[in-house]
Image: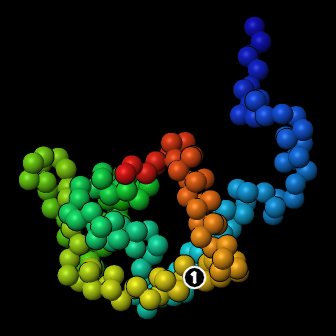
């Protein structure tokens, strides 16, 4: 008996669209450009924040804690779109540097709660200008009157496709 044919994720795509993407140069395809922009932003972030030795993911966790207050690790992972194992690892590294403290939940001993410390809050204050510079440098090539539109379009793409992510953001 023959195996069933492989199912293509582009079966519903018009043949002309498939050919159009196939004939598009790699460096002009959306996925490639989004990945490259992410790499560029991370490099700018790391350059601007080098003095503090903090990564963009660590910064996201710290910012989420600042905005949400003490939070269970699963809530943090959903807030920043990071899987639970990586969230736990990031929190552990941040706790070693005394930027956060982690404790067992008072209501459910199986859960851990992370909380921003005074040292972590001071770090976020020091990072305000460097992070702002990294964000500004990332979009600096855009005319100032197009930046808000670009950010709205990015938000639309992320929100529209959130559920297909391995780690959807839950608000």
Q: Is residue 92 above or below residue 72?
A: below
Number of disc labels: 1
Query: Disc 1 designates what residue?
Result: 136
Residue 12 lies, in percent from the top left, at 76, 30
Quarter of image, res 59: bottom left
Q: Residue furthest bottom?
A: 51
Residue 50 lies, in percent from the top left, at 47, 88
Q: Identify which residue, 171 or 89, lies in the foreground.
A: 171
Q: Is residue 55 above or below residue 102?
A: below
Q: Residue at x 53, y 50 (%)?
A: 159
The N terminus is located in which quarter? Answer: top right
Q: Identify which residue, 35 or 53, lies in the foreground.
A: 35
Q: Is residue 93 above or below residue 20?
A: below
Q: Is residue 161 above or below residue 88?
A: above
Q: Residue furthest left?
A: 106
Q: Residue at x 57, y 46 (%)?
A: 161
Would residue 86 be found to the left or right of residue 141 on screen? left
Disc 1 is placed on an element classified as helix
Residue 108 lies, in percent from the top left, at 12, 46
Circle 1 packing at 10 Å, graded few (<14), some (14-19), many (20+), is some
Q: Is residue 40 visible?
A: no
Residue 48 lies, in percent from the top left, at 51, 88
Q: Residue at x 77, y 12 (%)?
A: 2
Q: Identify which residue, 113 or 63, lies in the foreground.
A: 63
């Amino acid at each position: 008996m023959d195996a069933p044919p492989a199912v293509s994720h582009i079966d519903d795509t018009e043949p002309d669209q498939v050919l159009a993407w196939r004939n598009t140069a790699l460096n002009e395809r959306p996925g490639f450009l989004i990945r490259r922009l992410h790499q560029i932003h991370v490099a700018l972030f790391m350059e601007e924040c080098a003095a503090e030795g903090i990564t963009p993911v660590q910064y996201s966790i710290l910012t989420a804690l600042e905005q949400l207050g003490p939070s269970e690790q699963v809530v943090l992972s959903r807030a920043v779109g990071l899987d639970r194992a990586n969230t736990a690892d990031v929190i552990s590294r941040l706790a070693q540097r005394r930027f956060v403290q982690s404790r067992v939940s008072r209501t459910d001993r199986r859960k851990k709660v992370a909380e921003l410390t005074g040292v972590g809050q001071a770090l976020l204050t020091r990072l305000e200008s460097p992070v702002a510079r990294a964000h500004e440098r990332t979009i600096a090539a855009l005319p100032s009157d197009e930046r808000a539109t670009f950010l709205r379009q990015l938000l639309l793409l992320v929100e529209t496709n959130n559920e297909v992510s391995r780690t959807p953001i839950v608000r």
